[in-house]
């Protein structure tokens, strides 16, 4: 008996499906339209800010997307996955170290994170890399040493690696109890961002462009990942521009001033919706420390803001399931507070 053909989709279901597929783009357009009506100047500023931010992150995004697409097309992803096999604690340590010294921003590393998770790399090692990556990179180290001092730059690097190790260990212990067996959102592992969830082992073909199937795979992975990241980053940068415009820097200054344990806790919480990127935050923290803010509060603000800034948090939300996102935020807050407290004790020693 032949299977009956499925009925055509109704106009209403087509609209619902369109909204589900394009809701992120539509949200960005709606925000700009509302701004254009009530605050035309801010609409232009937000659009320009988002465009400039995309151009600034484009080199990292292009590199990371190309690496992810190349790994899938050549079959090198299987080698990468095997590199993450072995003793879990060693993999966590290596993931945190790689994240602490990698040049990728928190958004640019998303395609690699998705590919690693889709390949079956344990979430503990990936989380270690994920948490450490947005806090420090080589250029950030040099700038931190110049704007603040070398001691702060070294401590921030240790905080990045330490947060990665801490987060990886927590995930490892939870995973042993059966948690987070399937961390990616539905559809992410099937070409949405990083390729198929289960890849059959195939021989590595470095010159993949000689094979039509592998060329097609490279193109599909690159295009779908680019569109996936673009829609979320545009919305994230628009929201970031509004926070820059509507939350005065004086408000942050008043909240983070002073010494003691309370400013460290406040800096951790204020860092969650941090509207400043890591580079722009350095002069602010330097100025606040010059006015008497505790160094530990500055460290907590930079660590929390780096991991949970609007673009970074929205990228995690788009990629991972809600429980993984909640754990990411929880680990970020706990680690940022601990980093600030330890740095404060270090400076007082």
Image (tube, grey):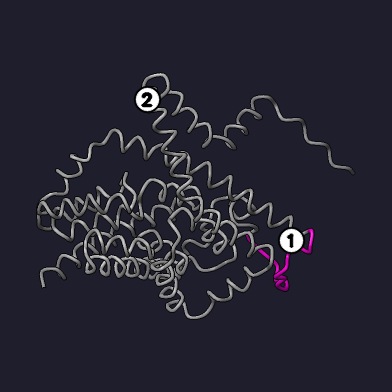
The residue pinned by badge 2 equals 41
Structural distance between the alpha carbons of marks 1 and 2: 47 Å
Q: Looking at this rendering, what residue extends furthest in the top direction?
A: 37
The segment highlighted magenta reads 197-212
Q: Residue at x 42, y 22 (%)?
A: 36
Q: Residue at x 59, y 50 (%)?
A: 225
Frontmost residue, 335 versus 14: 335
- Any mark on residue 214, and which? 1
Instruction: Tell me the quarter of the picture where residue 200 sits.
Output: bottom right
Left or right? Give the position of 290 relative to 170.
left
Crowding around mark 2 (Cα neighbors within 10 Å: few <14, some 14 to 19, many 20+) is few
Q: Secondary structure at mark 1?
A: helix
Q: Position of residue 228 (x, y in %)?
A: 56, 46
Q: Position of residue 185 (x, y in %)?
A: 54, 51
Left or right? Give the position of 190 relative to 50.
right
Q: Quadrant of the N terminus?
A: top right
**Badge 1 or badge 2: first in the primary sequence:** 2
Q: Position of residue 133 (x, y in %)?
A: 41, 62
Figure check: 54 above or below 248:
below
Instruction: Tell me the quarter of the picture where residue 124 sits.
Output: bottom left
- Any mark on residue 115, and which? none
Can residue 157 be found in the magenta stretch?
Answer: no
Q: Looking at this rendering, what residue extends furthest in the right direction?
A: 1
> Is label 1 or label 2 in front?
2
Figure check: 121 above or below 274:
below
Q: Position of residue 92 (x, y in %)?
A: 43, 73
Marks 1/2 in contact by CB < 8 Å: the verdict is: no
Q: Residue at x 40, y 49 (%)?
A: 313
Frontmost residue, 19 versus 3: 19
Crowding around mark 1 (Cα neighbors within 10 Å: few <14, some 14 to 19, many 20+) is many
Left or right? Give the position of 155 relative to 48.
left
């Amino acid at each position: 008996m032949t299977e009956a053909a499925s009925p055509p989709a109704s106009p209403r279901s087509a609209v619902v499906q369109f909204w589900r597929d394009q809701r992120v783009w539509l949200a960005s357009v709606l925000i700009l339209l509302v701004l254009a009506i009530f605050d035309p100047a801010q609409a232009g500023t937000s659009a320009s800010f988002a465009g400039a931010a995309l151009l600034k992150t484009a080199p990292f995004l292009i590199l990371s997307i190309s690496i992810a697409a190349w790994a899938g097309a050549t079959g090198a992803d299987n080698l990468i996955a095997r590199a993450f096999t072995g003793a879990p604690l060693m993999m966590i340590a290596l993931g945190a170290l790689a994240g602490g010294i990698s040049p990728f921003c928190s958004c640019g590393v998303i395609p690699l994170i998705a590919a690693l998770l889709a390949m079956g790399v344990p979430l503990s090692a990936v989380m270690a890399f994920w948490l450490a990556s947005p806090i420090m990179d080589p250029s950030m180290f040099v700038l931190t040493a110049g704007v603040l001092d070398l001691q702060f730059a070294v401590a921030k690097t240790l905080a990045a690696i330490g947060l990665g190790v801490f987060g990886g260990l927590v995930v490892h212990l939870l995973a042993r109890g059966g948690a987070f067996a399937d961390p990616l959102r539905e559809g992410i592992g099937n070409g949405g961002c990083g390729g198929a969830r289960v890849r059959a082992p195939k021989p590595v073909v470095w010159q993949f462009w000689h094979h039509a199937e592998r060329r097609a795979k490279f193109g599909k992975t690159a295009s779908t990942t680019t569109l996936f990241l673009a829609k979320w980053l545009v919305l994230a940068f628009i929201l970031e521009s509004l926070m820059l415009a509507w939350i005065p820097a004086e408000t942050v200054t008043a909240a983070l001033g002073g010494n003691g344990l309370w400013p460290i806790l406040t800096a951790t919480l204020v860092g969650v919706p941090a509207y400043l990127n890591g580079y722009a935050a350095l002069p602010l923290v330097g100025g606040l420390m010059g006015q008497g803010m505790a160094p530990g509060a500055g460290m907590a603000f930079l660590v929390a803001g780096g991991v949970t800034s609007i673009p970074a948090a929205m990228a995690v939300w788009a990629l991972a399931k809600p429980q993984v996102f909640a754990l990411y935020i929880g680990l970020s807050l706990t680690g940022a507070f601990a980093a600030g407290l330890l740095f404060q004790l270090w400076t007082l020693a």
